[in-house]
Image: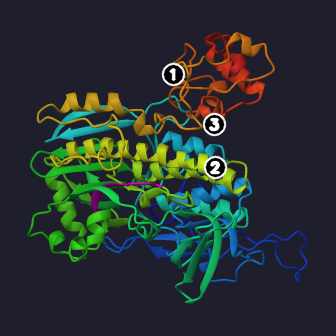
Amino acid sequence: MAKSVLPSTWENGFKEPGKGAPWVAESSVANEAEDEEPHYTTPPSSEILTSEVHNELGLNVLRTWPTIYDGTNTPHDLPEWWAPSSEVDVLICGAGPSGLQVALSLVRQGVTFRIIDKAPTPLIAGRADGVQPRFLETLHSWGLATEVHEEGPLIEHTAIYKDGKKLLFARSHQSDSRYRGLHIITQGQIERIYIRDLLRHHKLVERQTIITDFKVESDQSKDSHPVIATLRNERSGKEESVRAKFLVASDGAASMVRKKLDIPFDGVSTEIYWGIMDCVFETDYPHAWVFGSVISSKHGGCVIIPREDGYIRLYTQLDTSKTGEIAKSRQANSESLKESGGRVDVNSITAEEVLEQANKIFAPYTLKFAAPLSWFAVWKISERVARSFSSKDNRVHLVGDAAHVHSVMGAFGLNASIMDSANLAWKLGLCALNLAKPSILLPTYDTERRAHANRIIRVSGSYLRFVCNSDFPLADFTKVSGLPDLPGAIKYTSGQDLDFLAQFFKTNGQFLLGVDAPYFHTPISPAPKSGARVAIAPKKWRQSTKSPSLLLSQSNRIPLRRPNRRLNNPPRSLRLRPPWSRPRRPHLFLRPPLRSWIFLYYLRQPSALQSRSRNDADAY
């Protein structure tokens, strides 16, 4: 959400501004006796500023409900059921989207955990703003996809202009997922959706709480909870010792846990800075509400992301000359920011100056503010990957920005973090419940996700350098991290714009949507003995009651055979088919029930999909 929803009414047959506060539910009482209290009272709301920097059009506020979203930092009494234990299966440090998603998975597996965060509230505004189809497929299995994909606009087209001329305008973000396109939603709203779900399971985020120190017992055979962490509440000053089987660090790019483990953060820090604004703009640019880029050979580039309620997220490449305000900033010269990148606190840079730079890039088109700023920030780009995502004893694991940071291109920041969490959480659940051996299962997290992060750096970095006209070299992890030279990096040659775009999207189109992420062979996805793919459900298996293990050379999504109909209007039976019917990770279904094999075999038969008439399909 970019701003508070204003009251409205439909009394005259159309929507128009209303009065009052319709979001406050009226008290309803089954018994109309005056001395009986209502069965439900709407929690009090408050409105908070969304941006520290403003324009001449005023201030922007967002309505929130502290009792619901602020966890233990609630201004009211804590629930009676809240009784955190000093011994849990998993301790989660950081309540951003990656940490919260680990919690969502663990609570559904019956695994005990505590989740802490140093911030007093969820993210108010800004940061990540789009989710990929694979992200929504993961949430669908937990019943949360609808709350996310209906929040903002759907991106299905891309427009790219260079030096005032149209370079490309075409359909984009297409895949075989039921959730096609890039779905726009703010990171703060995703956090609130997750927090509401945890609240339904009687779990709270422990706010303004940090880990001051932790250690892992060396003799783990005698102690089932070898991780010992010291927590401190920054508001009360109270300290507490917590024991856990595993520690998950989702504490951001400047991760204290990663530094405590002495894990190098390999990569490069670029000299590229973005001025980021969420606002409504008045412009004559013809594709202002279409996802895309505007590039100037002289002044740099801008990235446009349409938002809800007519708002636009505008990334503007800033002038970083040695005499500029960014170079003078004390924080920009700090060692921590040089390594991890992130938000730069430069109060001397105004929104009007960033808008002036954007107008230079957009020329001959013009931009001007049409509403108060919803968010404003200056961001430095770093491209780094931790040398290991797990400690040597597999008791401490890094997820999200603690494990990798990269360009905003491709919406990889939020989406890659969520895939880290989804990959790690089910493995932690099995190990915490003593259903799998940590020494065998948990190392696969590092093997799979670190290679994926490497390719993200190459893909997003290539496109970043194209938009920004930069020849800054890409990070090379093959020597320091032992990773192979993965595909994705496309070198841009000046004057060959269309050739670059054609090759880039042909190579990385599905990877940008999260549906193409091949992993290396691990104990859970072993290499076929013959070196070839094993057919899905051969005839001798279909006639047997025993189903063998499924072996694929790489864990790509099983291709779906579509019926011969218009792809943009598939039959309802196909639209409603669950995402696990064509899984990207088929090796998770080792030795499944026979009915799963029958279902997979059914999907492989084109006649099974083409034999149904439209009436039959609509009956689903």
Residue 518 at x, y percent in the picture: 46, 34
Label at residue 588: 3
Confirm whether the magenta stretch covers residue 333.
no
Label at residue 567: 1
* Left or right of 594 on screen, residue 438: left
Residue 353 at x, y percent in the picture: 18, 66
* Left or right of 333 on screen, residue 247: right
Amino acid carrying mark 2 in the image? Trp
Of the image marks 3 and 2, the number of the one nearer the N terminus: 2
> In front: 529, or 238?
529
- Report the Cα–Cα distance between label 3 and label 2: 11 Å
Which residue lies under the disc numbered 2? 426
Indicate the secondary structure of the residue bearing disc 2: helix
Residue furthest to the bottom = 237
- Report the Cα–Cα distance between label 3 and label 1: 29 Å
Amino acid carrying mark 1 in the image? Leu
Give the residue drawn at x 9%, y 49%: 298
Quadrant in which the C terminus appears? top right
- Report the Cα–Cα distance between label 2 and label 1: 34 Å
